[in-house]
Image: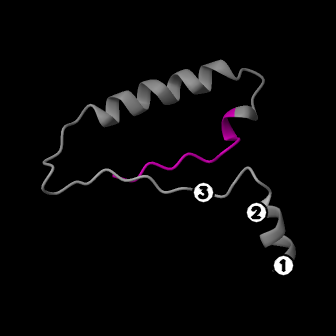
Amino acid sequence: MNIWIPDGMKDITVDRLAPRQRLLEALDEVISEKFDPAHHIDAVESKLFGIGAEKLHRRLQ
């Protein structure tokens, strides 16, 4: 399972709480399904977003 949430998309709207509540409910529903650990490994992929690295990357292209 790969869950990716575009950073900042939840802040475009005037109502910032409702998108977060819908996201929480949707993730709870998706993650509630149990998978066989022999075929599913939990992992976290770290990102550099938030420290300005994406702006430097765009400038170098």
Q: Which of marks 1 and 2 is nearer the N terminus?
A: 2
Q: In which quarter of the image is residue 32?
A: top left
- The residue type indicated by label 2 comes to Glu
- The residue type indicated by label 3 comes to Lys
- Name the residue: 15% across, 49% down: 37
* Relative depth, front residue between 18 and 32: 32
Q: Where is residue 45 in the image (x, y as percent from the top left)?
A: 48, 57
| Local secondary structure at mark 3 | loop
The reply, left or right, for residue 11 in relation to residue 39 is: right
Give the magenta range.
Answer: 1-10
Q: Residue 54 carries which label?
A: 2
| Separation of residues labelled 1 and 3 (CA atoms) | 19 Å
Q: Where is residue 12 in the image (x, y as percent from the top left)?
A: 76, 35
Q: Position of residue 54 (x, y in %)?
A: 76, 63
- Name the residue: 69% across, 54% down: 49
| Local secondary structure at mark 2 | helix
User: Would you say residue 9 sits in the magenta stretch?
Assistant: yes
| Separation of residues labelled 3 and 2 (CA atoms) | 10 Å
Q: Quadrant of the C terminus?
A: bottom right
Magenta segment, prevailing SS (helix, strand or loop): loop
- The residue type indicated by label 1 comes to Leu
Q: Residue 47 carries which label?
A: 3
Q: In which quarter of the image is residue 41?
A: bottom left
Q: Which mark is residue 4?
A: none
The reply, left or right, for residue 14 in relation to residue 30 is: right
Instruction: Judge whether 30 appears above or below 47 on screen.
Output: above
The reply, left or right, for residue 61 in relation to residue 7 is: right
Residue linked to disc 1:
60
The reply, left or right, for residue 16 in relation to residue 36 is: right
> Mark 3, residues whose alpha carbon is within 10 Å: few (<14), some, or many (≥20)?
few
| Separation of residues labelled 1 and 2 (CA atoms) | 10 Å
Q: Earlier in the sequence, mark 3 or mark 2?
A: 3
